[in-house]
Image (spheres, grey):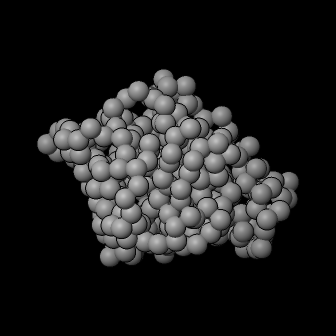
């Protein structure tokens, strides 16, 4: 089985990937600045890259500073640290592996396509071989786009296989309340008569359950492309109001009588939904509907 390194292995996607791949018998090593059961080296990944001299069949690079929309729109300096983190890991990968899997972000897509009418965002909208690129979503989007550009150049100049995933709004067990789904579930349990949403709640996202993301990671370890960018999403735009209504109905058998809108909170782009044509072509269309995924998340949340 392949020998794998996972950076950011204490985070939501990194921890899920560590557990998922270990269960399948892979030789997995995790590194993260935070301790935890999925962390073998508790250290800054930049220090790991500087002092370690170990080869891997593949590196899955999840380490990043994100922590939700509020940080994306306000913690600019911390967001820029992602450039340094990515540079260190990509440089390490050129010396110690033949395959780097990089979970980028849907934030790389031009915000001009994410306005009042949902436009399905296709991989071709970010063309790194072209002379122009659209404006991504805030500093976080720029850091991810910069990493993708560096990976493109590295691929052109080194014998390194690159898989770039662009996950949309992933959710599932282990995600912190900095993110919408766990935060909404907590609020609906704790304050059923004071349901709140950031903005008017009509803004949409493309929600995808974590096991469908993990299936794509499995596939990435065996696919034959030298360089590939691939959306991971459902292809369905769902408003935050709709998510609230689904979760509320799960607990109380009805819709909330009223949803309080917090118009002073950051809401991001108006609509964001993936074009999943390539995902479908590769046989990776998500298996888990939003309703089923929310039921599974709630079951895990209430029993943890």
Q: Position of residue 191 (x, y in %)?
A: 76, 74
- Establish if 254 lies above or below 65: above
* Residue 287 in the figure: left or right of residue 219: right
Instruction: Identify the image quadrant of the N terminus.
Output: top right
Residue 237 visible (yes or no): no
Q: Quadrant of residue 261?
A: bottom right
Q: Nearer the viewer, residue 14 or 1?
A: 1
Residue farthest to the right, as pictured:
253
Q: Position of residue 124 (x, y in %)?
A: 31, 35
Residue farthest to the left, as pictured:
131
Q: Nearer the viewer, residue 121 or 130?
A: 130
Q: Nearer the viewer, residue 277 or 153?
A: 153
* Residue 99 in the figure: left or right of residue 70: left
- Establish if 282 lies above or below 147: above
Instruction: Identify the image quadrant of the C terminus.
Output: bottom right
Q: Position of residue 259 (x, y in %)?
A: 67, 65
Residue in the image at 37% along x and 59% along y: 53
Residue in the image at 38% along x and 41% along y: 99
Residue in the image at 64% along x and 52% along y: 19
């Amino acid at each position: 089985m392949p020998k794998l390194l996972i950076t950011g292995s204490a985070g939501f996607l990194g921890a899920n990937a560590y557990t998922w791949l270990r269960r399948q018998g892979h030789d997995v090593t995790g590194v993260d600045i935070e301790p935890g059961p999925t962390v073998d080296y508790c250290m800054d990944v930049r220090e790991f890259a500087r002092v370690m001299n170990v080869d891997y069949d593949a590196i899955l690079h999840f380490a990043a500073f994100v922590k939700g929309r509020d940080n994306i729109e306000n913690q600019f300096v911390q967001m820029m640290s992602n450039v340094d983190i990515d540079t260190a890991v990509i440089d390490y990968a050129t010396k110690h592996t033949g395959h780097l899997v990089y979970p980028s972000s849907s934030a790389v897509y031009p915000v001009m396509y994410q306005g009042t009418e949902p436009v399905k965002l296709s991989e071709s909208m970010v063309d790194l071989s072209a002379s122009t690129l659209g404006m991504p979503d805030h500093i976080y989007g720029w850091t991810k786009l910069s990493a993708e550009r560096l990976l493109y150049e590295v691929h052109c100049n080194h014998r390194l296989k690159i898989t770039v995933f662009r996950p949309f709004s992933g959710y599932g067990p282990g995600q912190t309340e900095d993110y919408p789904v766990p935060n909404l579930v907590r609020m609906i349990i704790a304050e059923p008569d004071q349901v709140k949403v950031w903005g008017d709640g009509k803004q949409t996202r493309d929600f995808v359950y974590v096991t469908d993301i993990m299936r794509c990671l499995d596939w990435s370890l065996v696919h034959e492309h030298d360089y590939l960018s691939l959306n991971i999403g459902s292809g369905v735009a769902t408003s935050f109001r709709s998510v609230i209504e689904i979760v509320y109905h799960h607990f109380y058998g009805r819709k909330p009588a009223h949803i309080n809108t917090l118009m002073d909170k950051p809401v991001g782009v108006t609509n964001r939904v993936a074009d999943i044509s390539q995902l479908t072509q590769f046989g990776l269309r998500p298996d888990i509907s939003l309703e089923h995924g929310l039921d599974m998340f709630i079951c895990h949340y209430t029993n943890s």
